[in-house]
Image: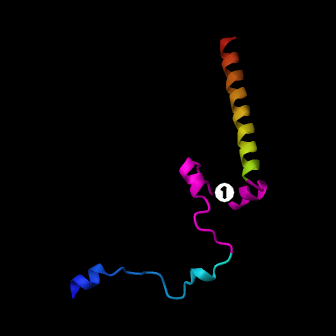
């Protein structure tokens, strides 16, 4: 009898979970991005409120990179003077 129990799949989901009734859910929505190596990042609510989409986040981060690079350049120039 023990072997029969071991061969059965144990379903830990509750019976009230009916995923067929979910609306708007898309299986594998981000699978292509995942395969491409894209990082998914969870933003805190206050940060997400400032950036309406991924393009806005990318633009802000690119600007931050430019500012940091200029700052490094300025610091390096000041050291050589």
Q: Secondary structure at mark 1?
A: loop
Q: Is residue 35 magenta?
A: yes
- On the image, which quarter does residue 11 sit in? bottom left
In this orientation, which residue lies closer to the viewer: 66 or 39? 39
Chief SS of the magenta region: loop
Residue 40, placed above or below residue 20: above
Local packing at callout 1 (Cα closer than 10 Å; few below 14, some 14-19, many 20+) is few
Residue 64, placed above or below residue 28: above
Q: In screen coordinates, is 74 left or right of 36?
A: right
Q: In screen coordinates, is 36 left or right of 66?
A: left
Residue 1, placed above or below residue 40: below
Residue at 75 percent across and 55 percent down: it is 53
- On the image, which quarter does residue 18 sit in? bottom right
Q: In screen coordinates, is 38 left or right of 56?
A: left
Residue at 63 percent across and 57 percent down: it is 42
Q: How is the image coloured?
A: rainbow
Task: Give x and y (percent) for residue 66.
Answer: 72, 32
Residue 40, placed above or below residue 79: below
Task: Give x and y (percent) for residue 48.
Answer: 72, 57
In this orientation, which residue lies closer to the viewer: 30 or 55? 30
Q: Residue furthest top?
A: 81
**Figure disc tally:** 1
Residues drawn in magenta: 24-53
In this orientation, which residue lies closer to the viewer: 66 or 77? 66
Task: Give x and y (percent) for residue 20.
Answer: 59, 81
Residue at 73 percent across and 48 percent down: it is 57
Task: Give x and y (percent) for residue 55.
Answer: 75, 48
Residue at 69 percent across and 35 percent down: it is 65
Instruction: Specify the quadrant that holds the N terminus.
Output: bottom left
Q: Is residue 39 magenta?
A: yes
Q: Which residue is mark 1?
A: 43
């Amino acid at each position: 009898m023990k072997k029969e129990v071991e061969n059965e799949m144990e379903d830990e989901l509750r019976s009230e979970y009916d995923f067929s009734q979910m609306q708007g859910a898309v299986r594998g929505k981000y699978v292509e991005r995942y395969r491409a190596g894209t990082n998914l990042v969870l933003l805190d609510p206050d940060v997400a409120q400032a950036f309406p989409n991924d393009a806005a986040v990318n633009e802000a981060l690119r600007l931050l990179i430019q500012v940091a690079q200029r700052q490094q350049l300025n610091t390096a120039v000041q050291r050589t003077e």
